[in-house]
Structures are given as C-alpha cells and as structure tokens.
Image: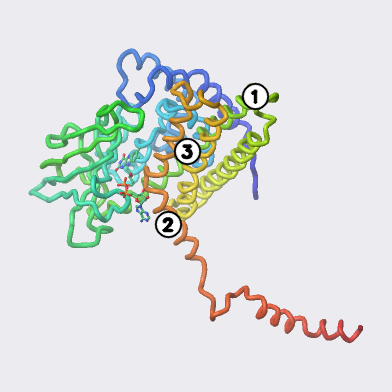
Amino acid sequence: MWDFETEPEFQQKLDWVDTFVREEVEPIDLLWPHQQFIPLDEARRKVIDPLKDQVRSHDLWACHLGPDLGGQGYGQLKLALLNEILGRSSWAPVVFGTQAPDTGNAEIIAHYGTPEQKERYLTPLLNGEMFSCYSMTEPHAGADPRMFTTRAVKDGDEWVINGWKFFSSNAKTASFLIVMVVTDPDVSAYRGMSMFLVPSDTPGVNIVRNVGLAYDPMNEGSHALIHYEDVRVPADALLGGEGQAFAIAQTRLGGGRIHHAMRTIGLAQKALDMMAERALSRETAGSLLADKQFVQGYIADSYAQLVQFRLFVLYTAWEIDKYKDYKRVRKDIATAKVVMPTVLHDIAWRAMQVHGALGTTNEMPFFTMIHNAAVMGLADGPTEVHKVTVARQVLHDYKPSADVWPTEWIPRKLEAARAKYADYIEHEVGNL
Ligand SMILES: Cc1cc2nc3c(=O)[nH]c(=O)nc-3n(C[C@H](O)[C@H](O)[C@H](O)COP(=O)(O)OP(=O)(O)OC[C@H]3O[C@@H](n4cnc5c(N)ncnc54)[C@H](O)[C@@H]3O)c2cc1C
C-alpha cells in the first residue's frame, strides 16, 4: 500500500515542532552561533534546559532511539519528518537530543556496549549531559580506512594506544572518544581493527590543534588533530569484540548519513523559502524578480530538486523501518548521501544569487549553507566513494549479455517477435 499522508496525531506534533523551532530555537542560533557542542554554562543552561523539558513533555526527546533506550521508537520515517524541521536550525538537534555525532555514537554503544559501558557512557549521553567524539580519520588517510595506522597493543590487562587522528569533531568538549585502531596488523583491516571507548582526560590524549571550518577563527575550531601517545586503557574499554571495528562503523555511519540527509531537506527548504520571498519582494527593470523567467527557472529547478530528494529520503527511511537493516538499504542510503550536497548547494547558491550583494554577506545565511553542502560531500565519506558503492550495488542486480549483441538489440528481438506471432502475421497477410 502506498500512502503519502502523516497520521493526524503525529502531524499535530510536527506542527508544534515547527512553531517551537522557529520561535524558540532559531533565535538561539543567532545568540550562540557554533556553540551547540560546548557544555552549558549557568546562563545557557537556564535557557536550554527548559526547552529540552518542553521537548520531553511532547514525547519528542531522542526520537532516533527505541523506548528501551529512552527514545520514542517512532521509527525512521517519522524521524525524517521531524528531522526535516530540525534541519532549519543548528541548535534544534541538541534541544531534541538528536545531534550528530552523539546520535551515531549512542547507537553503537547501545548495539555493542556491555551493561557497564552503557551505564557509564550511554545513559548520560542520552540525557544530554555529555558530548562524545568519533575519532577515526587520520592525517594521512580518511576515505580509505584500510590505511589507518593508529595502533593498540595489549600490555597485560591494558591496551596501549599510539598514533594520530584528524578531524575528530568536538573532541575538545567531549567527555569520551570512540577511537578506531589497528589491533592486529597481520590480518586484513576488516578483521584487524577495533574500537575503544577512551575518556577524554586519559593521560596521553593530546589535542594538538583544533582545526576550524571556513568561518571559524584560526585554531578555534572543533575538529581536533589528536596525538594518542601511550594512552593506556583497561581491557574493558574495548567496544564490541576485537576486530569488529568495520562492522561497528557501518552500523554507525548508515544511520548517521541518512539523518544528515533528513536535516538537509530542512536547510534546503529554508533556502527555497528565502528565495521565493525575495523574488516576490524585489523589483528591477520594471517588474518583480518573480516575473523574470531566469528567476522562475531558479525556483522551479529548486522545487524539483528538493521534492525529488525529499521523497527519496522519506522512501529510504521507510525502507529502513521495513527491513530494520542498514546494510540491506545501503544502496539507497549511499544514493541519498551522494545527492544531498548537490541539492543543498544548488538551492542555496540560487537563493544567494537572487538576493544580490546582500546574499553574499554575513547578514544572510547562504554562504554557511553552501559551506555546509561542501561538508556534506566529505563528512561520513566523500561523494566519489559513495558513488562507487551505489554503482556496485546497482550492477549487482544485472548480468552481462549472453553474446556480442546487447539483449535489447532490435534485429534479434524483432526476429523473436515475428516467430512468436508467426501464425497471426501469416493470417493477417493471408487476409490482405
Ligand atoms: C566537517 C567535518 C566533520 C568531520 N568529522 C569527523 C569525525 O568526527 N570523525 C572522523 O573520524 N572524521 C571526521 N571527518 C572526516 C571525514 O570522514 C573525512 O574527511 C572523509 O572520510 C574523507 O577523508 P579525507 O578528508 O582524508 O579525504 P581523502 O581520503 O584524502 O580524499 C580526498 C578526495 O579524494 C577523492 N577520493 C578519495 N577516495 C576516492 C575513491 N575511492 N575514488 C575516487 N575518488 C576518491 C575524493 O574527491 C575525496 O574528497 C569530518 C569531516 C568534515 C569535513
């Protein structure tokens, strides 16, 4: 059965979220920009905690998780409808307990953690009381995890970690890091890498520099270059089994990627809303921008891109709910990941253009959106690598043609068609 309607009860919740995000949360984006991952001080706590309470009272806290983990268990499709509203605002995911990278980190601890690990890390993470960091990329290698060299060696009851990690987002404010390391260099990387839960204040976790994104002041960014220098952790810091890092990473990144796509719908919609408002407000050369065919083209192209992307993301979310298996839906998650940066980039770029000079300034959000699009093409893996995944998965369902001629080669098919309907054709000819 195909159905494109939202249940009335959930639609009521979405309507509440829409007003709440616009009126209560978006102002915070302006007051405290890029600060959503800094632990709350007294002043901010007074504002943010009551907002979180309102979210909880509407049964909308941590919607990416099932009820057993303090979430709502609405599933991915409803999460998509929620996330596309939250995507308008950088603070909204924190206020709703669904911010990356903590969502993915929570998911893998929930999936692979021991009861002790869950109590120590998962519970406070889900309560929004701590931040976490996923430390995988290395300075010399990102897209190909098989090249990672950061190493953990067993020493009695402990593991000793040595190596370098790059772009470990939020390491400076995280209470713990999930670190992917080589534990057995003698087998394939798929079996020789493991994940460790490392408290950030462990001796030897040295943040060398906090790399900033385009708009951050030098050295005041959130993406850490970390030197792990003789970092000792107990044996029970291992997450999942030894050699399980790849399987764990796939669990984490599958969810993370589609959640980014859901939020990107909201951001792209915001850009389209602004473009339409400007087109209807600004006059030049004797008419409104909305009456110029170029601008109409921008609006039509943007709407077409956004609506296709949105339907595809909702469909992928529906598939995840149906199969409960990220691996089975891998092709479509990768496709959404591939399409996402282009959709956001194109719509934000056109919206910026329609705003003229003002669009390029720090008084409008377009440049941040375009930068966001660039980030979406890299974070959780570059577009090119995901295209390879999509192509492989698509090709998987096909076979080569049996001989030198393609299956759809018309002369052979025509001959077959004539043979199939020979009686009828002969009869038809005979009647002439
Ligand atoms: C904002 C942001 C936040 C991030 N947060 C984290 C984090 O929290 N933790 C973490 O561990 N990492 C994080 N990353 C890192 C991210 O996962 C890597 O940037 C990504 O995996 C690519 O690695 P790289 O940057 O080393 O690029 P490289 O591996 O050097 O690739 C560079 C380029 O080469 C091309 N390329 C690479 N491989 C292929 C291929 N197989 N075929 C064709 N072309 C290819 C692509 O154009 C690619 O963009 C973050 C990145 C960004 C931008």
Which residue is labeled 3 in the image?
Answer: 73
Residue most toward the front? 285
Image coords of residue 335 (percent x, y)? 49, 51
Q: Which of marks 3 and 2 is nearer the N terminus?
A: 3
Q: How crowded is mark 1: few (under 14 residues within 10 Å), some or many (20 or more)?
A: few
Asked if the residue at tag 2 contacts the one at tag 3, i.e. Cβ–Cβ closer than 8 Å, the answer is no
Q: How far apart are marks 3 and 2 (CA)?
A: 29 Å
> Which residue is at 24% across, 47% downward?
180
- Seen in the image, is 129 located left or right of residue 278? left
Picture coordinates of residue 81, whole percent (x, y): 54, 36
Is residue 149 found left or right of 399 in the rendered image? left
Mark 2, secondary structure of its residue: helix
Query: Where does the image place residue 162, in percent across and percent down from the top left?
Result: 14, 45
Give residue 284's mark.
1
* Amino acid tagged 1: Thr
Q: Which badge, 2 or 1, comes first in the chain's sequence?
A: 1
